[in-house]
Image (cartoon, rainbow, N blue to C red):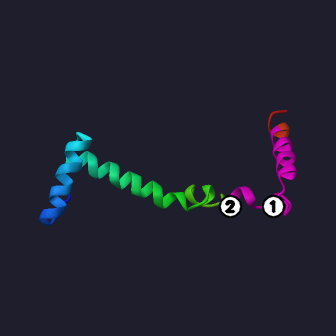
């Protein structure tokens, strides 16, 4: 349970938003938090949002995997080896 104290002006603004959005306070707060959280995540790279590089996959990996052609080749070799 969350309890928040608002001044009169903010309470009035909240009432206006609720009327415009046609929702209840709980739903509005959930949406606002989700939107804000997504905004914070937008500054992170995909790898950061996913929790970083999986270390076990990078062990023994060649140093030249930053090149796309090398990654594609390595993935193709891995898949061929795995499914043959």
Label 2 sits on residue: 55
Dot 2: few (<14), some (14–19), or many (≥20) neighbours within 10 Å?
Answer: few
Residue 1 in view of the camera? no
Q: Position of residue 76 (x, y in %)?
A: 84, 41
Most common SS among magenta residues: helix
Q: Which residues are magenta?
A: 55-79
Q: Verify whether residue 73 appears in magenta.
A: yes
Point out residue 83 in the picture as x, y percentages from the top left corner: 80, 34
Q: Is residue 35 left or right of residue 26?
A: right
Task: Check disc 2 and report its element: helix, strand or loop.
Answer: helix
Decide which of 42, 49 is in the foreground and name it.
Answer: 42
Q: Nearer the viewer, residue 8 or 45?
A: 8
**Viewer-nearest residue: 4 or 17:** 17
Secondary structure, mark 1, is loop
Which residue position is annotated with label 1?
60
The number of callouts visible is 2
């Amino acid at each position: 349970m969350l309890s928040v104290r608002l001044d009169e002006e903010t309470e009035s603004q909240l009432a206006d938003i609720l009327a415009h959005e046609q929702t209840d306070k709980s739903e509005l707060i959930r949406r606002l938090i989700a939107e804000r959280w997504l905004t914070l995540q937008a500054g992170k790279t995909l790898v950061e949002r996913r929790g970083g590089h999986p270390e076990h996959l990078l062990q023994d990996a060649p140093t030249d995997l930053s090149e796309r052609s090398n990654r594609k080749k390595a993935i193709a070799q891995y898949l061929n080896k795995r499914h043959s």
